[in-house]
Amino acid sequence: MRGAGADQISVLVRTMLESKASKNLDHELLRVGFAFHFHRGVQITVTVSSINKMLKLHATDEAVPVTPGMQLVEVTAPASSENYTEVVAAMSSFCEHLAPLLHLSKPGISTGVVPTAAAAAASLMSDGGGTTL
Ligand SMILES: *[C@@H]1O[C@H](CO)[C@@H](O)[C@H](O)[C@H]1NC(C)=O
C-alpha cells in the first residue's frame, strides 16, 4: 500500500495456501496469494490471490491459473447489526484509498484504473461480457 497514511498502518503479511474441490469434483482449485490483517478502527482483512486449476490430483506445482495475469482482491471485516455502520464507514474509507492503486479487469476485459471505490464497483458490476467465475 502507498499514499498518505500508509506508513501509519501496521500490517501483518501472511502467505496463504487454500485448496478446494469444484462442485462436480472435476478438478481441484488452488488459491495462492497473501492475506493482510490490520486494524484501521476496525479489523480489516485484504486478500490478494489467484485461482488455479489443478489438472492432476494434489499436483500444486502444476496448477494452471484460471484467469492468467489477474488477481482477486477481497476486502472483508467482521460486523454485527450493532456495529455495522462503523464497519461500513471504515471499509468505505479504506476502499477509497485502495481503489486508485488497482488496475481492474474482468476475464477478457480490462476496465482500467478508477479513482474511487464507487467507480471501481460500478466498473466491475457493469455488463462487460466477462465470464462469470
Ligand atoms: C463488530 O462486531 C463483530 C461481531 O461481534 C466483531 O467481530 C467485530 O470485531 C466488531 N467490530 C467493531 C469495530 O467493534
Image: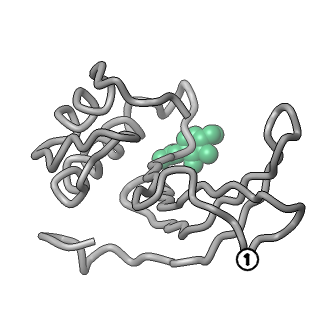
- Residue in the picture at 49% in, 51% down: 67
Residue 1 rendering spot, x and y as whole percentages: 28, 71
Whole-percent x and y of residue 37? 51, 66
Direction from residue 29 to residue 88 in the image, left or right: left
* Image vertical order of residue 92 relative to residue 23, above or below: below
Q: What colour scheme has been applied to the protein in the rendered image?
A: one colour
Identified by mark 1, the residue type is Asp
* Image side of residue 74 versus residue 119, left or right: right
Residue 122 left/right relative to 54: left
Q: Say if 1 sits above or below 26 in the image.
A: below
Q: Which residue is mark 1?
A: 61
Query: Could you tell me which residue is drawn at 82 percent across and 32 percent down?
Result: 23
Q: How many marks?
A: 1
Q: Quadrant of residue 51?
A: bottom right
Ligand 1 picture quarter: top right
Q: What's the residue at 56%, 68% (across, down)?
A: 33
